[in-house]
């Protein structure tokens, strides 16, 4: 794949549920140099196969030096160094258009090494769905003056692709 790096995997840790779930995840990093006019970006695609109804959460942990604000359905994450990211989430039920996933900001913890714990910021996207569903997370570096709504974030060349089922 030109211009991108992909890591993907699957797990069946939810097979014990009354309505079993198979979870597949892919990280796709799109390199700026391969897409003129667009920033580098990371897209995380979680595909869940099931016949039942389940509640899903995507949790992103950030370091203690980060702050977050919700803007136009997406979240701006700012680091103390001045670097910033826009984060957006949407879910796509089988054979239908995607819908935004509301993101909330929670307090939590990270551990940079064994035996230590620091307060941190967690972004939580949550939805409930029946049957197969794909959850997309887009993470794009931005400048302080950039403004991207959730729709604009998912219209970028690297994040606009409709996901295909993963084959792990």
Image (tube, rainbow, N blue to C red):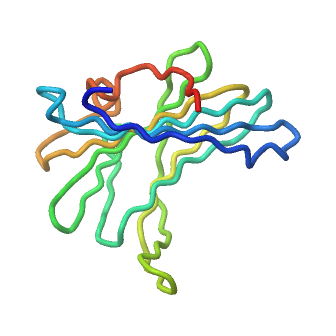
| Residue 103 image point, x, y percent | 47, 46
114 lies left or right of 88: right
71 lies left or right of 93: left
| Residue 104 image point, x, y percent | 48, 52
Q: Nearer the viewer, residue 125 or 166?
A: 166
Name the image quarter holding the N terminus.
top left
The image shows residue 110, relative to residue 146, as above or below, that is: below
At x 44%, y 19%, the residue is 162
Q: Residue furthest top?
A: 95
| Residue 89 image point, x, y percent | 44, 38
Name the image quarter holding the C terminus.
top right
Q: Nearer the viewer, residue 3 or 116?
A: 3
Q: Residue furthest right?
A: 18
The image shows residue 123, relative to residue 149, as above or below, that is: below
At x 80%, y 31%, the residue is 52
At x 22%, y 46%, the residue is 141
Q: Splitting the image into 4 quarters, where does residue 140 fall?
A: top left
**Count of numbered marks:** 0
The image shows residue 133, relative to residue 13, as above or below, that is: above
| Residue 4 image point, x, y percent | 30, 33
At x 72%, y 28%, the residue is 130
The image shows residue 95, relative to residue 8, as above or below, that is: above
80 lies left or right of 134: left
32 lies left or right of 152: left
């Amino acid at each position: 794949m030109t211009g991108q790096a992909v890591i993907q995997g699957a797990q069946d840790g939810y097979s014990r549920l009354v309505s079993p779930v198979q979870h597949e995840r892919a990280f796709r990093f799109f390199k700026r140099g391969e897409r003129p006019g667009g920033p580098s970006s990371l897209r995380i695609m979680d595909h869940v196969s099931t016949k039942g109804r389940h509640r899903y959460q995507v949790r992103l942990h950030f370091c203690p030096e980060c702050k977050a604000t919700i803007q136009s359905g997406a979240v701006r994450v700012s680091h103390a160094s001045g670097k910033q990211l826009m984060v957006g989430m949407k879910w796509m039920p089988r054979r239908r258009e995607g819908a935004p996933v509301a993101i909330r900001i929670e307090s939590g913890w990270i551990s940079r090494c064994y035996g230590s714990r620091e307060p941190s910021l967690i972004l939580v996207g949550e939805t409930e769905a029946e049957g197969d569903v794909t959850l997309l997370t887009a993470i794009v570096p931005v400048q302080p003056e950039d403004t991207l709504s959730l729709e604009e974030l998912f219209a970028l060349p690297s994040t606009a692709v409709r996901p295909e089922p993963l084959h792990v």
